[in-house]
Amino acid sequence: MITPGLESEAALAPLRAWWQGANVPVLILPDGLLPEAATRLRAEIAPRLSRYEVADRGRWWWDRHSAHAELFERLGALGSLLIGSSLRLVAARWLRFGHGDYALLKGDDGRTSEPGVELTVDFSEAATGEADVVYLGAGPGDLWAVPQQPGGIVLCDRQRAPYRYERYLTHRVGEAEVHRLRLTLLSDR
């Protein structure tokens, strides 16, 4: 499911060094998920999604109950290797956004005061040029916009970037949909 070689120490060592020394709480791994795995995940999760609509929080399709043990385990291990600390899964959310969908700051359920990370996998079919995930820090100018990229895996330190929203999908996306898996992983320390 994960791109071969990505989970190797040789691939992860420079990323871990960067993560530990960077002043940026977001790490993007392009093409981290294989396209055929993304196709299987979209088909598998589609019938399980239900609609969420609260005006001041957002609009999207989601599922908080479906587990995918192998994928969750491998992503958790990848996150642990990247940050150099053991992580445990505390929440998983499958998300689908289409035209008119968005997630505002009040719809962000990933905030935590405990050490850990949020790991988001984009398993969309195609890039939309919209639906950026935007992380905000506590200080002025602390803003990190992550473009929607199929197959991409994003790691974010939510203590350093405690706020998140997802940009609105306009009419320009047509029938395209953005599919994401978001894991909350907390440190065992």
Image: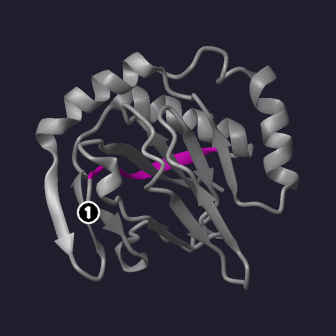
Q: Residue 153 or 109: which is nearer the viewer?
A: 153
Position in image of residue 89 (x %, y %): 45, 48
Position in image of residue 5 (x %, y %): 67, 16
Say left or right for 36 vs 18.
left
Position in image of residue 91 (x %, y %): 38, 54
Place residue 117 in its image quadrant: bottom right
**Image point 29% across, 57% down: which residue?**
171
Place residue 161 in its image quadrant: bottom right
* Image quadrant containing the N terminus: top left
Say left or right for 41 vs 32.
left
Which residues lie in the magenta part?
Answer: 86-98
Place residue 66 in its image quadrant: top left
* Image quadrant containing the C terminus: bottom right
**Residue 140 counted in the magenta span:** no
| 43 up-or-down from 46: above or below | above
Question: How many tags in the picture?
Answer: 1
**Image point 13% across, 53% down: which residue?**
50
> What secondary structure is found at the residue carrying circle 1?
loop
The residue indicated by pointer 1 is: 100
**Image point 42% across, 29% down: which residue?**
71
Say left or right for 186 vs 96.
right
Q: What residue type is labelled 1?
A: Gly
**Image point 14% across, 42% down: which residue?**
48
Say left or right for 187 vs 176.
right
> How many other residues sit within 10 Å of disc 1, few (<14), some (14-19) or many (≥20)?
some
